Image (spheres, rainbow, N blue to C red):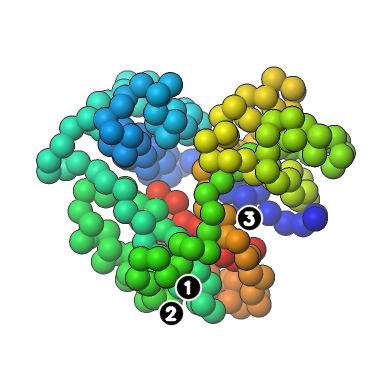
């Protein structure tokens, strides 16, 4: 299947201004802290997969080494000011399903902000479990096409243990098991492929292609949610 990929847009949304870079560092720092806490306090990335990936993502936005180390150290702390992972579920304009991943030290503040953005867009928050069953966790790798044939990409993906390959306009979307993404990425890199993005995602089991008007309203909501400091990632069922 060939066509536009929303993930192709993501790869171009790297920090280009001081404000954007600061927000990218904040989100990366919180992801590191939460990874340690969710991993039972394990600060060794070889024994904590989620932390290892968070470190990769922090390096991808050029976060300084000492900042990465401080964020990891905070993950072993507790009490007031400690960050925790909270997932919100909701519906955007047109009934599009949403999962919003956050890292927060104040769930009341974060919940209120997320709720406000949904309602302002004409959507609503949902109770836990109302939406999450429509998504599955995957690792995503974007590989630049660069003259690669679909058959060659499929063969390489199979060798790397990928579960699905989708051809887009300028990239191949490679879907792996959540815990296999780092190994697969290494295999693609060693084989000479150009990797443009790696992400841990929640993939909708039934993606929806809404009318353009509904799409635009949801894109506004996505942008508003992603601008919130507490929000780590936003996933929708919109193709």
Q: Which of 121 and 73 is in front in this view?
A: 73
Location of residue 138 in the rendering, given as x and y in whole percent from the top left corner: 56, 46
Question: Dot 3, how many residues are within 10 Å of its Cα: few (below 14), some (14-19), or many (20+)?
Answer: few
Location of residue 216 in the rendering, given as x and y in whole percent from the top left corner: 58, 71
Q: Do the residues labelled 1 and 2 touch (CB within 8 Å)?
A: yes
Q: Name the residue under label 2.
A: 122
Residue sitting at x 74%, y 30%: 159
State whether residue 61 appears in this view. Answer: no
Q: Earlier in the sequence, mark 1 or mark 2?
A: 1
Q: Is residue 79 left or right of residue 48?
A: left
Q: Mark 3 points at which residue?
A: 6
State whether residue 214 appears in this view. Answer: yes
Residue sitting at x 77%, y 57%: 3
Q: Is mark 3 on a helix, strand or loop?
A: helix
Question: Dot 1, how many residues are within 10 Å of its Cα: few (below 14), some (14-19), or many (20+)?
Answer: many
Q: Mark 1 points at which residue?
A: 92
Q: Which of marks 1 and 3 is nearer the N terminus?
A: 3
Q: In this view, does 71 lie to the left or right of 237?
A: left
Q: What element carries label 1?
A: loop
- Which residue is most to the left? 79
Q: Is residue 80 above or below residue 54?
A: below
Location of residue 66 in the rendering, given as x and y in whole percent from the top left corner: 32, 21
């Amino acid at each position: 299947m060939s066509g536009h990929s929303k993930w192709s847009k993501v790869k171009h949304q790297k920090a280009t201004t001081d404000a954007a870079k600061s927000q990218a560092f904040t989100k990366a720092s919180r992801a590191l802290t939460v990874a340690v806490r969710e991993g039972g306090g394990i600060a060794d990335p070889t024994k904590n997969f989620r932390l290892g990936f968070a470190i990769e993502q922090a390096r991808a936005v050029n976060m300084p080494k000492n900042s990465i180390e401080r964020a990891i150290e905070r993950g072993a702390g507790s009490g007031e000011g400690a960050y925790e992972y909270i997932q919100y579920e909701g519906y955007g304009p047109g009934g599009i399903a949403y999962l919003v991943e956050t890292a927060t030290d104040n769930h009341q503040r974060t919940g209120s902000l997320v709720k406000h953005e949904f309602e302002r867009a004409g959507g609503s928050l949902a109770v836990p479990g109302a939406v999450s069953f429509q998504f599955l966790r995957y690792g995503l790798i974007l590989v630049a096409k660069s003259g690669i044939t679909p058959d060659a990409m499929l063969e390489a993906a199979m060798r790397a243990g990928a579960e699905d390959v989708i051809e887009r306009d300028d990239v191949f979307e490679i879907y792996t098991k959540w815990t296999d993404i780092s190994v697969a990425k290494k295999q693609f890199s060693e084989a000479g492929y150009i990797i443009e993005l790696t992400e841990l995602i929640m993939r909708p089991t039934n993606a929806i292609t809404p009318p353009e008007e509904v799409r635009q309203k949801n894109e506004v909501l996505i942008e508003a949610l992603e601008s919130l400091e507490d929000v780590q990632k936003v996933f929708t069922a919109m193709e």
